[in-house]
Image: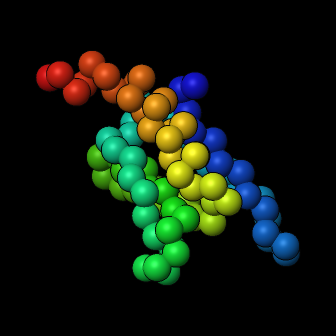
């Protein structure tokens, strides 16, 4: 996988589609929604960040995203 793809549709909302290239990401970390609920993931870029929340199984998704992030950045870790 070269990208993280996110698709969400609320009840009365237009669908939200986000495509985040691993090559442009600097780091990935777990985060909380509303400061207390542990169900979010943030992906940092050089100049910005993307935050995703309300995962049913945040830890499993974070593990999969982190594994792919490491595949794309393994050479960067040794510079």
x%, y% of residue 21? 49, 35
Task: Identify which residue, 76 or 62, lies in the foreground.
Answer: 62
Task: Identify which residue, 36 or 17, lies in the foreground.
Answer: 36
**Left-right relation of 29 to 61:** left
x%, y% of residue 30? 43, 57
Quadrant of the rendering where the N terminus is positioned: top right
Vertical position of residue 77 compared to residue 64: above or below: above
Q: State the residue lying farthest toward the left.
A: 79
Q: What's the residue at 46%, 79% (across, down)? A: 36
Q: State the residue lying farthest toward the right.
A: 12
x%, y% of residue 42? 44, 56
Quadrant of the rendering where the C terminus is positioned: top left
Q: How many marks?
A: 0
Q: What's the residue at 48%, 30% (across, down)? A: 68
Q: State the residue lying farthest toward the top.
A: 75
Q: What's the residue at 54%, 26% (across, down)? A: 2
Quadrant position of residue 73: top left
Judge whether residue 19 can be spotted in this image. Answer: no
Vertical position of residue 33 compared to residue 76: above or below: below
Q: What's the residue at 46%, 31% (across, down)? A: 67
Judge whether residue 54 can be spotted in this image. Answer: yes
Q: How is the image coloured?
A: rainbow
x%, y% of residue 22? 45, 33
């Amino acid at each position: 996988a070269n990208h993280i793809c996110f698709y969400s549709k609320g009840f009365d909302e237009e669908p939200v589609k986000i495509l985040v290239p691993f090559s442009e990401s600097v780091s990935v970390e777990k985060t909380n929604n509303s400061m207390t609920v542990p169900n979010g993931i943030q992906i940092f870029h050089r100049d910005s960040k993307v935050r995703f929340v309300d995962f049913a199984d945040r830890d499993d998704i974070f593990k999969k995203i982190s594994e792919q992030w490491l595949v794309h950045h393994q050479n960067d870790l040794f510079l």
